[in-house]
Amino acid sequence: MTTLEFRNVTKRYKVRGAGDMLALDDVSFSLESGQTIALVGQSGSGKSTIAKILTQLERATTGEVLLDGKPIPHRGPGLRRYRQRVRMVFQDPFASLNPYHTIRHHLERPLRLDKVVPKDQVESEVMALLERVRLDPSATVDRRPHELSGGQRQRVAIARALASRPELLIADEPVSMLDVSIRLGVLNLLADLQRESNLGVLYITHDLATARHFSDRIMVLHHGVVVERGDADGVILDPQHEYTRALRDASPDPDRHFAGPAGTASLRS
């Protein structure tokens, strides 16, 4: 079992003319294989700062990040191996894929850089990755990102994240830039992949409705502080903090918008 630990992390940014800005204040949590944790909060709550620190796009001011009990490296081959095990799906599928390259290039690159499979198996692995994210390989592989829909682009981004065979995924608002009509399909795909590969998933969102149905546990972040955490149903049905209650009251009814046949929720089973 893989365990990623975020231990007592504080992050301050220097703001010209305004001194320090506190983005995270002593935040701690752990994510394990096979588990999905939703990190919920409004814009500016610190959610994306956590994602950037986990992927080492930012450094913590104090505190540490550990993988299987060991501090993660900040540079060199060790950091590369860490990023192979912990991958990120970015919010904007329009910006995360290079418009000048084909889908084949986007998927071949991590396979070759991380030496995931022998060279003579790269082609078949690309096709298998597209099939895993429910895309037709022959109709997709030689197209460029602008020739795909937003939902298809995000599926390609997920396939690229899976190419290195990670153990953990950081999904930063993965459906917020997509049309409402296709969000559920992408979330169901992520849920299926999580179960199939025993992935640990940190699902970052502002939407409590999807957080409840997609996650085992929920953490609520407000002004850089975790104000509530617990089992998904417990946090939603019996919130203890006023900020959580405000988020819940502002969310659409999850049982109406995310229900499958006969009124059963389709994201968690």
Image (tube, grey):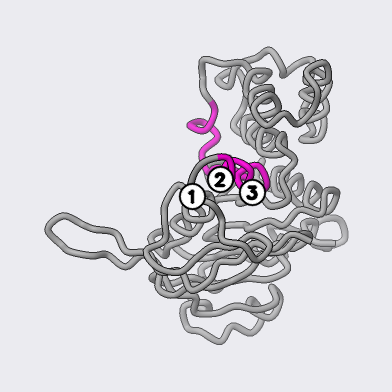
Q: In the visual, does 109 lie left or right of 25?
A: right
- The x and y percentages for residue 267 are 77, 57
Identify the residue position indicated by label 2 in the image: 79
In the rendered view, tell whether residue 265 sits above or below residue 145: below
Q: Amino acid at mark 3?
A: Val
- The x and y percentages for residue 152 are 66, 30
Identify the residue position indicated by label 3 in the image: 86
Q: Is residue 252 visible?
A: no
Q: Tell me the residue at 70%/43% (across/down).
A: 186
Instruction: Bin the neighbour count of mark 1 within 10 Å (Cα to Cα): few under 14, some 14-19, many 20 and up.
Output: few
In the rendered view, tell whether residue 158 sits above or below residue 44: above
The residue stretch that appears in magenta = 77-97
Q: Amino acid at mark 2?
A: Leu
Disc 1 from disc 3: Cα separation: 14 Å
Quarter of the image where the C terminus is located: bottom right
Point out which mark residue 74 bears: 1
Which callout, 1 or 2, points at the residue further toward the start of the chain? Answer: 1
* Secondary element at image label 3: strand
Circles 1, 2 touching at the beta carbon (< 8 Å)? yes
Q: In the visual, does 50 lie left or right of 189?
A: left
